[in-house]
Image (spheres, grey):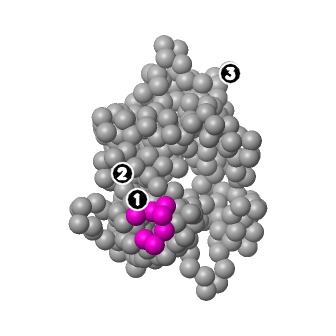
């Protein structure tokens, strides 16, 4: 029996009649909504989990308490996040790993190469981490594209981006040329559509595009991206790359080299409003809904 928190990963897609992916089924009427979650075990009758364990699951129901078979839960180490459990849904979880492997495996960032990175959806949970990793890995210039002046200030003043462009009020092609005088070498794409067309048109020869998200297309009838192949997942597990990546992300967050942004709303009853706000760009970083406080004063959240 667990108290828990949740991730919005893939949830917009599951509102369609067909997700386009066998591993991700559409939500059905009268069924409880679910998503990736993290929680604390309140009581246990199985040998794999004990009271106080922090556990995670991809398809956790959106409710304040749930009962699971211990075999389906994965334990996580709260020391990786200094007790801030919601980070397992963001910077030190699927979101952080997406940014980490996107930049490391597809960005071809090389220290000393005078590279410029552009990140769209840069004030979101994944984009904000990706830009910081690009800077730490050696990009001399990191430019973020987002939707408000507040977000632009956050990227530059708090996260160390070189510059930020407000797509709602600025001429993106002109600002890109101004902010990226040596062209664009790496593009972390979270939005697709016209913004990405503009960025890609200004990229240098031999540049690299990291296709992470297509937020501008999510309300259209398009399939959800397929998962990693079984072979690739097995290779990642055999080489222990995920664990190593999580440890590196944890070290960056603990040292302050990466800042994990969150937008927090209180109460499970406000989940629908928070989700709609996120889809309209109202969040800065990971959208969090806080459910309850624990004796350890650790925030338990759903996102």
Residue on which the image places disc 1:
54
Q: Label 1, secondary structure: give it.
A: strand
Q: Is residue 127 visible?
A: no
x and y percent of residue 169 in the render? 46, 48
Marks 1 and 2: CB-CB under 8 Å?
A: yes
Residue 67 can be seen, yes or no: yes
Q: Which mark is residue 219?
A: none
User: What residue did someone put label 2 on?
Assistant: 78
Quadrant of image for the C terminus: bottom left
In terms of depth relative to the viewer, which is nearer, 49 or 80?
A: 49
Dot placed on the residue nearer the N-terminal end, 3 or 1: 1
Quadrant occupied by the N terminus: bottom left
Around disc 1, counting alpha carbons within 10 Å, would you say few (fewer than 14), some (14 to 19), or many (20 or more)?
many
The span picked out in magenta is 44-50
Which numbered dot is residue 206? Answer: 3
Task: Label 3, secondary structure: give it.
Answer: strand
Is 46 contained in the magenta span? yes
Residue at 74 percent across and 46 percent down: it is 229
Q: Residue at x 61, y 86 (%)?
A: 30
Q: Is residue 241 left or right of residue 250?
A: right
Q: Position of residue 231 (x, y in %)?
A: 74, 41
């Amino acid at each position: 029996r667990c108290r828990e928190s949740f991730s919005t990963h893939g949830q917009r897609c599951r509102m369609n009649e067909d997700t386009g992916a066998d591993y991700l089924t559409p939500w059905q009427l009268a069924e409880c909504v679910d998503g990736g979650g993290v929680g604390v075990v309140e009581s246990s009758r199985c040998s794999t989990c004990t009271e106080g364990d922090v556990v995670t699951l991809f398809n956790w129901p959106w409710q304040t308490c749930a009962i699971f078979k211990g075999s389906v839960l994965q334990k996580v180490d709260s020391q990786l996040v200094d007790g801030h459990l919601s980070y397992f849904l963001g910077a030190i979880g699927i979101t952080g790993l997406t940014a980490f492997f996107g930049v490391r495996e597809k960005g071809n960032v090389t220290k000393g190469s005078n590279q410029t990175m552009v990140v769209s959806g840069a004030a979101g949970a994944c984009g904000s981490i990706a830009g910081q990793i690009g800077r730490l890995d050696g990009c001399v210039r990191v430019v973020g594209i987002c939707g408000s002046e507040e977000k632009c200030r956050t990227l530059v003043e708090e996260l160390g981006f070189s510059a930020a462009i407000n797509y709602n009020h600025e001429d993106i092609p002109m600002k890109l040329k101004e902010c990226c005088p040596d062209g664009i070498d790496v593009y972390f794409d979270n939005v697709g559509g016209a913004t990405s067309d503009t960025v890609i048109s200004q990229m240098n020869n031999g540049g690299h595009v990291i296709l992470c998200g297509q937020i501008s297309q999510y309300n259209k009838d398009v399939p959800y991206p397929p998962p990693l192949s079984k072979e690739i997942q097995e290779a990642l597990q055999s080489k222990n790359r995920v664990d190593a990546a999580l440890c590196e992300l944890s070290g960056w967050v603990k040292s302050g080299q990466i800042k994990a942004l969150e937008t927090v709303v209180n109460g499970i009853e406000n989940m629908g409003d928070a989700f709609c706000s996120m889809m309209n760009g109202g969040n800065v970083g990971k959208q969090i809904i806080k459910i309850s406080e624990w004796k350890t004063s650790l925030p338990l959240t759903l996102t």
